[in-house]
Image (spheres, grey):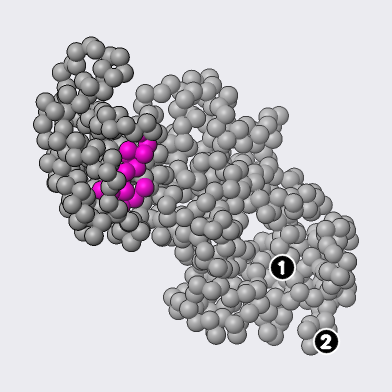
Amino acid sequence: MSDLRDAAMSSKAWPFEEARKLAKRYEKAPPEKGYVLFETGYGPSGLPHIGTFGEVARTTMIRRAFEEISDIPTRLICFSDDLDGMRKVPDNVPNQDMLHANIQKPLTSVPDPFEEFESFGHHNNAMLRRFLDTFGFEYEFYSATDYYQSGQFDEVLLRAVERYDDIMAVMLKSLREERQQTYSIFLPIHPETGRVLYVPMKEVNAKDGTITFDDEDGREWTLPVTGGNVKFQWKPDFGARWAALDVDFEMYGKDHSTNTPIYDRICEILGGKKPEHFTYELFLDENGEKISKSKGNGLTIDEWLTYASSESLSYFMYQKPKTAKRLWWDVIPKAVDEYHQQLRAYPTQDAKAQVNNPVWHIHGGNPPESKMVVPFAMLLNLASVAGATDKDGLWGFIKRYAPDASPDTHPDLDQAAGFAVRYFHDFVAPTRQFRLPSDQERAAMQDLAAALGSPEAALDQIARKNAAMGNDEPLPEVDFHSDDFLQSVVFAVGKKHGFENLREWFQALYEVLLGQSQGPRFGGFIALYGVEETIALINKGLAGELAA
């Protein structure tokens, strides 16, 4: 066993923990179908959102972890329940009146409000596939409409007719008494109106494979369950799909977790083996409310990619999947910088640490080298003080800070610079609030400007700080423009001026000079922006020009 596989077998990273559970499923013999099948489900009732992507990203991480510890081939399918009836009209799409006129029709029978595709279902499927393809996911796309209408679900539908009473018994236990009176596991599609009907069954005929029911106008109909005339209710659909496709693994949100025993039991009644599951916590919007496709109250896939790389989104998805996380604009910079921190650490780690590093899972065991020599948060601050309108406005500062860097040799940094300018103008600039310094802060900032303007004064500040802390050793030779030296100068000035909690000193610098309460490592910011430029910025802050 290789060092990497050996490390993977004991890794506490959640994808490996789930992969080992799945491997136990076939520890005695490999699957008869010849592969392990991973599935993700998608309800195309609204435009795809980041939560939808998260299921595919996280499932792919578990799939890659499984492939590291097992030699059994794998497949991943993304199944769209696009035969589902449109129960309500999403708020964030055009042509609302047209959609209301098609309520309760299968999504693949509802006209596309964007007038680009054959139907609303086809439009939303295309949106999902476009994004998954952008990320390079290896998957196969399955459409419920195709599967029902082509007869590929006929066998499991006929089996459900035969075992109708057993499945109904499972479902009725979970329903209120009033709902029990009208519930059926089958949803017929009206032959004339094309609407998906939620009506009770008058007869379920196992011999003929048919159902009989009255439509909403009281007319009686008898339809075969095969050929796309009937679909399953959504809870039975889970179990039936698992049985029909022989699914080995599926993850879903915590809101489904109470239904897991129902899904499992229906799968078993229909002759299948229940898959392994993983439930994740839901994403929350800025107000701590659950993100909804129909409300459009969370970040969309395209919105994240407007301000940060796809890899940073994958990193966000990797982190603590069983913890509810706020998914809003302000999480993006942190995700970008933490992702690159992990990339930089990866080459220095042994196999055990590498398989626990998020970037192993994001990149399937082959992470690239990070060329982000300037953190994203620092680029945001640089965009602020430099007044940059595009990434070219940042590269002059970057080149001085890192002479060997260029857009060609550091494409991730070049891309991030463009994202930073866009993010700053859209989210940071409108919320900045500069203030004037207090008397204590003013004296300290005057001292800082003086120290930055004179290496001798800077060294004197550091020597005084060291002496106050009982350190009388002579100072070593220093690079006066290095991050560490400049940070020491800022630190020494703050101590000299009586800031017992240096966080208050740094916060003052951020609020007076950058218009925000949090900011970068200030020594690094000075090194990037430039010493002379920082002195000029301090003088502007002291003169009240920034607060004005």
In front: label 2 or label 1? 2
In the image, which residues are magenta?
502-517
Q: Position of residue 156 (x, y in %)?
A: 75, 59
Q: Does residue 124 appear to the left or right of 39 in the view shown?
A: left
Local SS, label 1: strand
The answer to which image quadrant residue 544 occupies is: bottom left
Along the line of sight, the residue nearer the viewer: 528 or 153: 528
Determine if residue 369 is in view.
Answer: no
Residue at image coords 73%, 45%: 274
Dot 1: few (<14), some (14–19), or many (≥20) neighbours within 10 Å?
many
Dot 2: few (<14), some (14–19), or many (≥20) neighbours within 10 Å?
few
Q: Position of residue 292 (x, y in %)?
A: 57, 63
Local SS, label 2: loop
Along the line of sight, the residue nearer the viewer: 327 or 435: 435
- Disc 1 marks which residue? 231
- Disc 2 marks which residue? 218
Q: CA distance from mark 2 to mark 1?
A: 21 Å
Q: Does residue 514 appear to the left or right of 543 in the view shown?
A: right
Badge number at residue 113 = none
Residue type (three-letter) at the residue carrying disc 1: Lys
